[in-house]
């Protein structure tokens, strides 16, 4: 009788261990791997247009909402210069500016206090909203991004990147 109960306990332990193993790891067999999900690991948003990657686009708005500094990074992986068209609403009208990015180079706008800023006046959005910005170059089909609009009150790390004081 003692041998039977020891064997029963051993079998029960093996069954319990197997159930525990399947219960704790079974979901990995049916769940999508998180490493395969594309996301933007920052406050901004990005996309790719041909050989140009648009990275971490964020709109930084001043307190009165009259001006935005568009913070964005362009990465040109191509072998030719890319003249990137950036289109947005300013004062209720479509405005397009062009920024050149040399072949194999990175161009940043508004990402540090010394960077050239892309300023959008009277954007018609407020902090917490989304600013539609269209990016396109050459013969490549462009893409519209809904860029998050942030203020320095809730994001003090951006206080030195706001539009110039004269626009506030």
Image (cartoon, grey):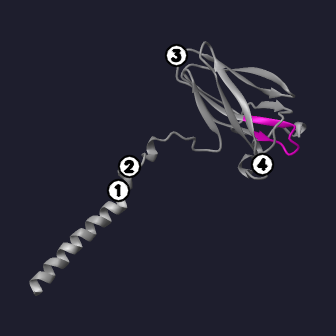
Q: Give the range drawn in magenta.
A: 60-70
- Name the disc covering residue 30, or none: 2
Name the element at disc 2. helix
Residue 25 lies, with reference to residue 124, above or below; the image says: below
- Name the disc covering residue 79, or none: 3
Where is residue 13 drawn, in percent x and y? 23, 73
Marks 3 and 2 in Cβ contact (< 8 Å) = no
Query: How far is the residue under mark 3 from the one under mark 1?
Result: 47 Å
Query: How far is the residue under mark 4 from the one under mark 2?
Result: 42 Å
Quarter of the image holding residue 90? Answer: top right
Query: Local crowd at mark 3 within 10 Å, few (<14), some, or many (≥20)?
Result: few
Residue 149 lies, with reference to residue 144, above or below; the image says: below
Q: Which residue lies furthest to the top in this view?
A: 139
Q: Which of marks 3 and 2 is nearer the N terminus?
A: 2
Q: In which quarter of the image is the C terminus?
A: top right
Does the magenta segment cover residue 68? Answer: yes
The residue labelled by disc 1 is 26
In the image, is 147 to the left or to the right of 106? right
At x 75%, y 46%, the residue is: 128
Query: How far is the residue under mark 3 from the one under mark 4?
Result: 38 Å
Quarter of the image holding residue 124? Answer: top right
- Name the disc covering residue 152, or none: 4
Name the element at disc 3. loop
Where is residue 92 drawn, in percent x and y? 86, 27
Q: Nearer the viewer, mark 3 or mark 4?
A: 4
Q: Which of marks 3 and 4 is nearer the N terminus?
A: 3
Where is residue 98 drawn, in percent x and y? 72, 19
Quarter of the image holding residue 46? Answer: top right
Query: How far is the residue under mark 2 from the one under mark 1?
Result: 7 Å
């Amino acid at each position: 009788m003692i041998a039977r109960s020891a064997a029963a306990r051993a079998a029960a332990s093996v069954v319990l261990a197997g159930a525990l193993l399947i219960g704790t790891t079974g979901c990995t067999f049916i769940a999508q791997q998180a490493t395969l999900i594309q996301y933007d690991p920052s406050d901004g948003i990005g996309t790719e247009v041909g050989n140009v990657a648009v990275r971490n686009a964020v709109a930084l708005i001043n307190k009165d909402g009259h001006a935005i500094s568009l913070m964005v990074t362009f990465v040109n992986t191509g072998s030719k210069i890319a003249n990137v068209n950036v289109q947005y609403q300013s004062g209720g009208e479509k405005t397009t500016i062009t920024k050149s990015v040399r072949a194999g180079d990175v161009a940043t706008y508004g990402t540090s206090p010394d960077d050239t800023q892309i300023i959008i006046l009277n954007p018609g959005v407020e902090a917490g909203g989304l600013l539609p910005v269209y990016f396109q170059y050459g013969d490549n089909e462009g893409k519209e991004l809904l860029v998050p609009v942030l203020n320095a009150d809730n994001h003090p790390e951006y206080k030195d990147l706001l539009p110039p004081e004269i626009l506030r």
